[in-house]
Amino acid sequence: MSTEKKFELRCPVYGFVSINEWERDIINQPAFQRLRRIKQLGFTDYIYPGALHSRFEHSLGVMHMASLVHDQVTSKSRELLSSKLDYNDAGLSRNKAIVRLAALLHDVGHSPFSHAGENLFPSHDSGHYRHEDYSAAIIRNELKDVIEEHKNNVNYGIKADEVANILDNLNPTANSLFWREIIDGQIDSDRMDYLLRDSVHTGVNYGKYDWQRIINTIEAVEDPESENLRLGVSEGGWHAAEGLVLARYFMFAQIYFHKTRVVYDHHIQEALKKILPEGTYPEPTETGIKEYIKWDDWKVFGYLSEGRGDIHGDVLLKRKHFR
């Protein structure tokens, strides 16, 4: 991996995000490029005009943040990772590649306008499907070849299932449960990135916190009850971690749960019920996922402009929301 070619992408949060050839080829797949056409915050730009960023941009940022977290944890907690999870240097290097791919692809299954239409996912025995289920299905089907057959994977032998399992937790192990916390936990790279990124694009300061201090103090800790490894911070990072919690609270109060933003989520959800076949997205099966990834913001806007969103579509086009 040390001799492979690297590419740097400009990022408004971190300055640069570095990727390798393998990651670049995954990013270039149509299933991932689709994220360019899905806005991170749905119709939030109707209230905060700068909120036009996409899931594409956020996904790159989460990969970058997850990589920083992984490096710090493996540096500070190498002995604990060795004794509890049986990792050696080669295993940690292979695991970093898996974590980076899982972070990069964690949102590849988002529906148009991100969370706004998730109630239209079909149901199954345990409830409704989640966007993580769609992300995992896309990884296992649409991205399997570019993951498993890439030249950069020769030394690692990583399977698409290993990447997807971190997201949908279909076959949990002590190892996958621990590394999953980097992407989906209390101090995860997903929320660490979206708070910073959404603050930049909405033009507010609510989501800013001392992320560098969190990175410097994050480590693996042993849960006293289960004896499993968890992500935590040393004493010097407590205030920074509290700052993250408060930043998330402020962003939800001021941005994500803004009353006008919430009503636009309602309008797009009702419009999608009219637009989608039978009012729901396809199931995340091998055949259903091929139809699902054809849906993005652009396609929905096309249907809205044709009047297929009924009264709610008209509201969205004319920006005359219910009050």
Image (tube, rainbow, N blue to C red):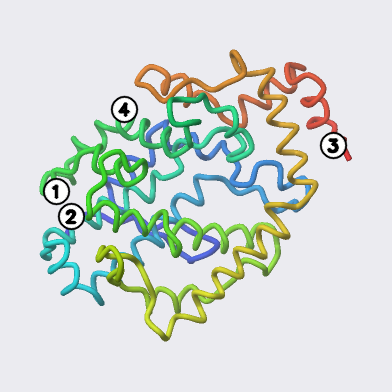
Residue neighbourhood size for the residue with mark 4, other residues' Cα within 10 Å, grouped as few (<14), some (14–19), many (≥20): some
Mark toward the viewer: 3 or 1: 3
Kindly identify which numbered label has been placed on residue 321.
Answer: 3
Residue position marked by numbered label 2 in the rendering: 94
> Residue type at mark 2?
Arg
* Residue found 37% across the figure and 71% down from its top: 232
Secondary structure under tag 2 reads helix
For the residues bearing labels 3 and 4, Cβ distance under 8 angstroms:
no
* Residue found 73% across the figure and 16% down from its top: 308
Q: CA distance from mark 2 to mark 3?
A: 50 Å
Residue position marked by numbered label 1 in the rendering: 156
Q: Position of residue 251 (x, y in %)?
A: 66, 61
Kindly identify which numbered label has been placed on residue 222.
Answer: none
For marks 3 and 1 on the same chain, the one whose residue lies earlier in the sequence: 1
Secondary structure under tag 4 reads helix
Secondary structure under tag 3 reads loop
For marks 2 and 3 on the same chain, the one whose residue lies earlier in the sequence: 2
Q: Position of residue 73 (x, y in %)?
A: 29, 70
Residue neighbourhood size for the residue with mark 1, other residues' Cα within 10 Å, grouped as few (<14), some (14–19), many (≥20): some
> Residue type at mark 3?
His
Q: Position of residue 39 (x, y in %)?
A: 60, 42
For the residues bearing labels 2 and 1, Cβ distance under 8 angstroms:
yes
Residue position marked by numbered label 4 in the rendering: 141
For marks 3 and 4 on the same chain, the one whose residue lies earlier in the sequence: 4
